[in-house]
Image (spheres, rainbow, N blue to C red):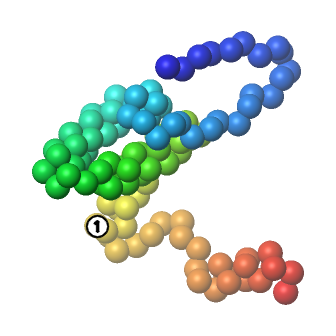
Amino acid sequence: MLTFVSLPAGTPEPPAVPPAADPQAIRACLTPPMVAEFDHEWEFVLEQAKQEKDITAIHSLLNKWRHLAFAELKDPGSHFRMLAKAEQIERTGENPGAVSIEDMRALIERRLGR
């Protein structure tokens, strides 16, 4: 359950924190389309865990979705934008806005102070 607290004017908002690794906390952070996707994967993994008598896949699913939920809290819509960009790259074979490997190496060298 999410609790909302009013902050005094001028008080910076505290940074977002990842939800707990449980289905209800994760679902509370997701948009309706993402909730549907999560629920579909959740049901599949639960059935798999019942069949295999192993909950490893449940932990993996919760970890994956915990990160996706946190990303959505920080930048709503980021998941679907990433999927759209991946589809565009696969379809066209090009990555618009990508940085060349040479530019990336130069940036790394600058950050390392070389």
Name the residue: 17% across, 46% down: 50
User: Vertically, is 74 above or below 12?
Assistant: below
Name the residue: 53% across, 42% down: 70
The quadrant of the picture occupied by the C terminus is bottom right
Query: On the image, which quarter does residue 6 sit in?
Result: top right
User: Vertically, is 57 above or below 106?
Assistant: above
Residue 113 pos. (x, y %)? 86, 81
Residue 72 pos. (x, y %)? 50, 40
Asked if residue 34 lies left or right of residue 74, the reply is: left
Outermost residue toward the front?
53
Query: On the image, which quarter does residue 83 sit in?
Result: bottom left
Report the front residue among 91 and 62.
62
Report the front residue among 10 and 62.
62
Residue 13 pos. (x, y %)? 75, 28
Name the residue: 40% across, 58% down: 85
- Residue identified by numbered label 1: 91
Q: Residues within 10 Å of mark 1 (few under 14, many from 20)?
A: few
Asked if residue 65 lies left or right of residue 10, the reply is: left
Amino acid type, mark 1: Arg
Asked if residue 44 lies left or right of residue 20, the reply is: left
